[in-house]
Image: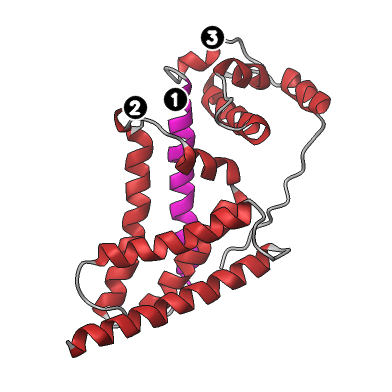
Amino acid sequence: MLLVSTCICYKEGVAKDSAAAKRTYHHGDLKRTLLEAALEVIRDVGHQSFTLREVARRAGVSHNAPYRHFRDKEHLLATVAAQGFERLEQYMADAARPGRTAMERLHGSGRGYVAFALAHPEHFAVMFERTTQVSEDEIARTAGMHAFQALVAHVTACQADGTMPPGDPLPMALVAWSAVHGIAKLAIAKNLPFGSVEEIIAFTRVMTDVIERGASAFGKRRRRR
C-alpha cells in the first residue's frame, strides 16, 4: 500500500518569487519547468485564476515561452490533467500489486486512488473540476479513460473468480469509483474526522469492505430470482 503525506510546505510569496527568478531556462526541460510552475500557480490561486503569463513568470521565462509547447492555457491544463491520470493509474497499480486475490487488488486500487488525491490535490482538481469541451481536452480524456479501464479490469477479474456478480462490469466499476472519489474529495476539503493520511486510508479500507459485502449480497439476490 502506498502511503503518502498530505503535508505541503508553503513558502512565503517573496521566497517563491526569488526562487522563480533564479531558475534558468534550458531548452530541453522547458516543458517540465512550465508544468511544475503551473502546479505552483494552481496550488496558490486555483485553476480558475490560472494564466500562462503567471506560469511564465514563475518559471523565470518570457511570457511567450509557454507557447513553444502549449497553444493556450487550456492545452497546458489538459496536459496537467493527463499527467495526473497517468500518475493516478500508477498509484492504483502500485497499491493493487501486493494483493493475493482479485478482490484484494481491487481494494488496493481504491486505496491507491485516495492516496494519489491526497498527495496531488492540484492535479486532482484539474482532472475533475474543470468544465471544458471534450474536443479541447482529448489528451486528458484519453488518459482518464485509460485509468478507468484499469479499474474496470479489476472488477472483471473479481467477476471471473465469483467474488462479484456477473454481468456488465461498468455499474460495479462506477460504484467503486464513486465511493473512493467521494472519500478523496471529502479528505482534500478536510471534511472527514481524521487527522492523518493513515486514518483516511484505513477508512477507505472500511469502505471497500462494505462495497465487497454489498456486491456479494447483490449477487446472491440476483441468483435467487
What segment carries the magenta color? 73-99
Ranked by sequence position, the earlier of labels 2 and 1 is 1
Tell me the quadrant of the picture where the N terminus can be found: bottom right
Q: CA distance from mark 2 to mark 1?
A: 8 Å
Q: Nearer the viewer, residue 87 or 192?
A: 192
Residue farthest bottom in this picture: 224
Residue 149: which quarter of the image?
A: bottom left
The residue identified by callout 1 is 74
Is residue 19 in sight in this rendering?
yes
Q: CA distance from mark 2 to mark 3?
A: 21 Å
Ranked by sequence position, the earlier of labels 3 and 1 is 3
31 left or right of 174 in image: right
Q: CA distance from mark 3 to mark 1?
A: 15 Å
Within 10 Å of disc 2 (Cα), the crowding (few <14, some 14-19, many 20+) is few
Circles 2 and 1: CB atoms closer than 8 Å: yes
The residue identified by callout 2 is 136
**Three-letter amino acid code at the position of disc 2:** Glu
Ranked by sequence position, the earlier of labels 2 and 3 is 3
Circles 2 and 3: CB atoms closer than 8 Å: no
The residue identified by callout 3 is 64
User: Residue at position x 35%, y 59% from top?
Assistant: 150
**Three-letter amino acid code at the position of disc 1:** Glu
Is residue 101 in sight in this rendering?
no
Percent position (x, y) of residue 23? 70, 21
Within 10 Å of disc 3 (Cα), the crowding (few <14, some 14-19, many 20+) is few
Percent position (x, y) of residue 75? 42, 25
User: Residue at position x 64%, y 21% from top?
Assistant: 59
State yes or no: residue 98 in magenta: yes
Within 10 Å of disc 1 (Cα), the crowding (few <14, some 14-19, many 20+) is some
Task: Determine whether 37 is above or below 208 in the image.
Answer: above
